[in-house]
Amino acid sequence: MTITFTPTNNLTLPPAWHRLTPIWQGGEEIIQQSLPHTQLAPAWQLMLLGDGSPTRHLELLTGEAVEVDVIDMSLIGMDLDAAPELIQAVPGPRLRRQVWLRTPSGQRLAYATSWWEASHVDEYLQNRSLPIWASLARLRTELYRDVRGIYYGDSLALESGFGVPGPFWGRHYLFWHHGQPLTLIYEVFSPYLTKYLGSMQLSAVNADA
C-alpha cells in the first residue's frame, strides 16, 4: 500500500485521478426516476442509484471482507481538481483520497476518489486503511448519501487497474452529516461484479439517451 502526500504549492498539482470519459451520463432527475431495465439491470441500479453503503453491498455479494488499497492522498488546496461541480460544497482547503476496493485475494471490485476538508479528514478517517463506510460506522456517524450523477464511460487507467475492458459504470455523491456536506465521492465499479449482479443488460445507451 502506497500513501503519498503532495501539497499544492507554486504551480505543482498532485497526480491525476481517474475520471470516466462519458459515453452517457445522467443527473438527479434520472437518478430519481431510475433507468429502463434494458439500459441497466435492476440489481445494478440498486448498486449505482441506491443510498446504501457500496462497501457493505460488496461484502454481502462476495461473502468476503472488502479491503482498501490507498493509492493517493494529496493536498489540493482550493483547486477544483477536475472534480464534479459539487466539490465546491466541500470547504477548503481540501484533501483528495484515491483507493481501490478489493477482496483479500486481490480482486479489485471498485475504484473511488473522495474529497475532504483537509483540516477534518483525520477526525473521520482515523484508520486510513479502512473503507470510508467502516471508518464512519466505528464512529457511529449519522450520514445521508446523496447520489447526484451517474456515468457510463471509458478510462484506460481503470481498464488497466481492473484488468478488464470498459466501458464502466460510475457515480458521484455527497455525504451529508448534521446537515453539512462532509465529503464528495466518485466511484467506478468493475464489470467483474456481473459474476454476482448478473448482466448489466446494456442495450441502448448512447450520447443521446
Image (cartoon, helix red, strand yellow):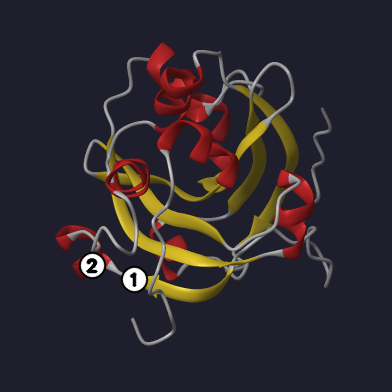
Q: Position of residue 117 (x, y in %)?
A: 51, 46
- SS for dot 1: strand
Q: Is residue 118 left or right of residue 133?
A: right
Q: Amino acid at mark 1?
A: Gly
Q: Is residue 61 above or below residue 185?
A: above
Q: Position of residue 170 (x, y in %)?
A: 48, 56
Instruction: Using the rendered view, name the quadrant where residue 5 is placed.
Output: top right
Determine the residue positioned at 73% across, 18% down: 105
Determine the residue positioned at 66% across, 39% down: 99
Q: Is residue 88 left or right of residue 126?
A: left
- SS for dot 2: helix
Q: Is residue 135 above or below residue 79?
A: above
| Residue placed most toward the observer, 209 or 140 | 209
Q: Dot 1: within a 10 Å radius of its alpha carbon, few (fewer than 14), some, or many (20 or more) residues?
A: some
Determine the residue positioned at 80% across, 63% down: 9
Residue 30: assigned label: 2
Residue 35: assigned label: none
Instruction: Using the rendered view, name the quadrant where residue 140 is placed.
Output: top left
Q: Is residue 196 above or below residue 171?
A: above
Identify residue for label 1: 26
Query: Decide: marks 2, 1 in contact (CB < 8 A)?
Result: yes
Task: Tell me the quarter of the image containing the C terminus.
Answer: bottom left
The mark tally for this picture is: 2
| Residue placed most toward the observer, 74 or 109 | 109
Task: Tell me the quarter of the image containing the N terminus.
Answer: top right
